[in-house]
Image: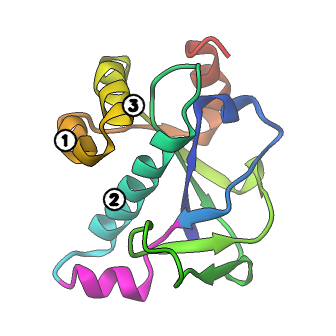
Amino acid sequence: MRVYLAAAPAALVAPQLEAEIVYAVTPALAAVFPDDDEEELEAIAALCAAELSLSLLGAGPARRLVVAADVEPERLREVTDREDLYTGALALDGPVAWEEAVSLHLDDVAAEEAVRAARSQPERADELLAEHDLLWFDISERGKVAASLGL
């Protein structure tokens, strides 16, 4: 199943990806957006993960990072007891190997100021980041992306 993991840019050089919560196109997410097609629902799930990534940023680059990966459905379970998460959140058992990752979604350098503002004003995150789409990279570009961030 395709999932979207929130990550900090430093995760690009980690041996594997760690995430307790991921987002995916679930029946519940599709029910909230009944007029959206699969591609639009995937974009919504990725944006939910992007917002979660704000909480993971440390002293490094102020850029949201989302990693799309294909994991076995047996490793996922519905999250029902967390009101702080959006619809489409799933709990993930175990780390994700880079071999399971298919793409990276990262803010452009021009978004850094807005990302910093969104971190300090989370209630305005949607408004502050509305003009900043995540850039798409094939997973084969992971090394190049990490190097461009000084990692």
- Which residue corresponds to the image point at 79% horizontal and 58% vertical from the top-left? 95
The picture places residue 105, in percent across and down from the top left corner, at: 46, 41
**Residue type at numbered disc 1:** Ala
23 displayed left or right of 130: right
Q: Secondary structure at mark 2?
A: helix
Query: Left or right: where does residue 61 sit relative to residue 110?
Result: right
- Residue 26 magenta-highlighted: yes
Label pair 1/2, CB-CB below 8 angstroms: no
- Please tell me the numbered disc located at residue 54: none
Q: CA distance from mark 2 to mark 3?
A: 14 Å
Q: Which residue is mark 3?
A: 107
Q: Which residue is mark 1?
A: 130
Q: Are marks 1 and 3 in contact (CB under 8 Å)?
A: no
Cα gap from disc 1 to disc 3, whole angstroms:
12 Å
Please, what secondary structure does the residue beneath circle 1 have? loop
What is the magenta range?
A: 23-34
State the image quarter where residue 15 is shown: top right
Way the structure is coloured: rainbow
Q: Are marks 2 and 3 in contact (CB under 8 Å)?
A: no
Q: Identify which residue is drawn at 32% across, 70% down.
A: 41
Label 3 is placed on what type of residue? Asp
| N-terminal-most mark, 2 or 3 | 2
Q: Quadrant of the N terminus?
A: bottom right
Residue 1 visible somewhere in the drawing: no
Numbered circle sitting on residue 43: 2
Residue type indicated by callout 2: Ala
Q: Nearer the viewer, mark 1 or mark 2?
A: 1
Could you say where residue 84 lies in the image, as x and y percent from the top left? Answer: 43, 66
